Amino acid sequence: MKIISYNVNGIRAAIAKGFIDWLQQANPDVICLQEIKATEDQIPTQAITDAGYPYQYYYSATKKGYSGVAILSKTKPNNVVYGTGIEHMDFEGRNVRADFDSCSVMSLYLPSGTNIARLDHKFMFMDDFQNYINALKTTIPNLVICGDYNICHQAIDIHDPVRNKNTSGFLPQERAWLDGFMKSGFIDSFRHFNKEPHQYSWWSYRAGARGNNKGWRIDYNLVSQSLEEKLTRAVILPDAMHSDHCPVLVEIED
């Protein structure tokens, strides 16, 4: 099962940059999207169906043109769950889950902490999400939580850890939360296979950051430890250029 996570920073903009052709070439079984910034009626769903993904699940934010997640799949899931049931998460459209025979795949868009108010909201989200997942694991143990976590886990995951130590996305409290979340039963699938530095999934649009590879690794496919022996590959796909993020891929034996 090939699964990709991709913050597209606006699905309509990404499609205008060739996203659908790329999707056919990448050929995942399931792709989790974040920051779609659109409602389903604004998306060319037929073109996506024609590309091989007839099963499409969109969970948009209440606020137009903001946030939103989706899952596109070649095969029909057994079950789809929109949101978490936690209101402050769900009105921003940050979580959708599709349950398959071998595992459940979740598309997550964790908030950024762009100012004090949003940082407080982010910490509340993180705590509530941890509790939500702790409860979910009791009934759905084989989880793949794909998405934009808006946090770099370790110094190796950011181009300048010293200058960014007081920047949201690399704050000690955020990093400690992500570390604890992983230790609660999840594998960072990319680091499971790749320990090399300078591997990023997001670059600022400013100052030629992407061309100079001054990036952050904030997109993850976190896989339940119960699936460890089924992990076969995990890579970052930096050549996809439809967004300020790039896709991240994990492959799991069915």
Image: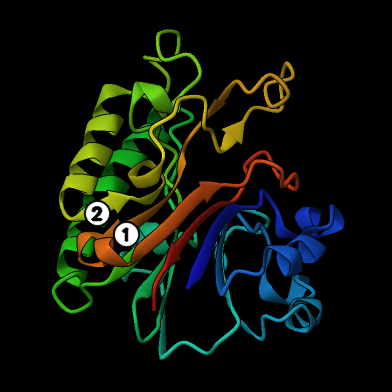
In the rendered view, tell whether residue 56 sits above or below residue 171.
Answer: below
Looking at the image, which is closer to me, 135 or 202?
202
Q: In this view, does 10 lie to the left or right of 28?
A: right
Res 100 seen here: yes
Looking at the image, which is closer to me, 96 or 78?
78
Looking at the image, which is closer to me, 37 or 1?
1
Q: Which mark is residue 171?
A: none
Where residue 46 sits, quadrant-wise, is bottom right
Disc 2 secondary structure class: strand
Disc 1 secondary structure class: strand
Where residue 71 sits, quadrant-wise, is bottom right
Res 146 seen here: no
Q: How crowded is mark 1: few (under 14 residues within 10 Å), some or many (20 or more)?
A: many
Colouring rule applied to residues: rainbow
Q: Which amino acid does label 2 sit on?
A: Phe
Residue at (24% x, 28% y) in the render: 173
Q: In this view, does 123 lie to the left or right of 135?
A: right
Q: Position of residue 81 (x, y in %)?
A: 40, 79
Question: Which residue is identified by label 1?
Answer: 223
Q: Position of residue 199 (x, y in %)?
A: 52, 32
In the rendered view, tell whether residue 118 sits above or below residue 212.
Answer: below
CA distance separating discs 2 and 1? 5 Å
Q: What residue type is labelled 1?
A: Val
Q: Position of residue 19 (x, y in %)?
A: 77, 59
Question: Which residue is identified by label 2?
Answer: 186
Please report contact status of discs 2 and 1: CB closer than 8 Å, yes or no.
yes
